[in-house]
Amino acid sequence: MKQRVRCLWLAGWSADGRCWQLVIERLPEAEHQVISFLDVAPSAEEIARRLHIAPPFVLIGWSMGAFLALQYAAAYPQHVTEVCVVSGASQFITQKRDARLLERMMRRVTEDPEQVLQEFDGRLFTTTEVKRIPATKRVIRGCAPDAETLLDGLGYLRTVSVRELAPWLQLPVHLLSGAADPICPVVGAEELAELLPQGDLTVWPEVGHVPFLSQPDRFVAWMKERCNID
């Protein structure tokens, strides 16, 4: 009898388990755990402490969670069969302009976190996606996290880079990016794919930062093709 596939899902900045709900509902044949960084420090060690599914598993990380997925796979390679990197890159800060924008965002989070989240959410989907997808399908969290939690995540993003560890990851890494993603532009995913020994990159035209919410059925098909889920 074939063993049931297990999936560990890592959420992105400011998101909770709701962000993966539409996809998980479409994968009833697998066992799932979601880790959000609203109540877990962003580190591989903290992820390992929170596990309740048994390894090995497919590790899926979105945005900030994509960096953590790769760091976890490097720290605990025996736990991971393959990694799906969704809207990821080799590092978050690539230009001085990015650093300035992040620093400004960190200052504003302490003053008005809800406004910062509203602006962030406004960048997740393209104009076409917003028109096509009901608001009820574009939910990544149930309520606004506190400013301290948001700052912890932004502090992680300010320094995170997987450029040095990527060449040492000896397992399949499947990357998916939207060509119209303004938060993690596809050029960062292209660079990461080149660094990975077993990396493959898929780019969806006219798709923004959250391809698994804008096209959940297509996303599930993409995963099944690569991760032996049936």
Image (cartoon, helix red, strand yellow):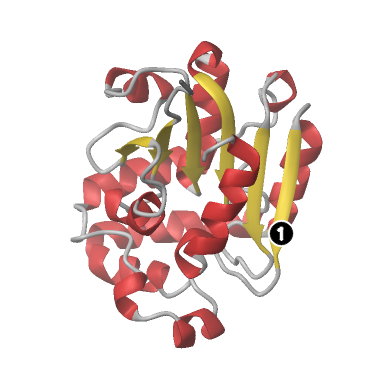
Where is residue 150 drawn, in percent x and y? 30, 49
Q: Quadrant of residue 49?
A: top left
Identified at 69% across, 66% down, the residue is 179
> What amino acid type is highlighted by mark number 1?
Val
Residue 16 is at least partly visible in this image: no
Residue 203 is at least partly visible in this image: yes
Say which of 125 and 154 sits in front. Answer: 125
Identified at 42% across, 23% down, the residue is 44
Outermost residue to the top: 78
Where is residue 199 drawn, in percent x and y? 74, 35
Tell me the residue that label 1 is attached to. 203
Outermost residue to the bottom: 131
73 left or right of 42 in image: right
179 left or right of 216 in image: right
Identified at 52% across, 67% down, the residue is 215
193 left or right of 35 in image: right
- Is 152 placed above or below 115 here? above
Q: Quadrant of residue 148?
A: top left
Q: Dot 1: within a 10 Å radius of its alpha carbon, few (fewer than 14), some, or many (20 or more) residues?
A: some
69 left or right of 49 in image: right
Q: Quadrant of residue 204?
A: bottom right
SS state under label 1 = strand
- Is 77 placed above or below 9 here? above
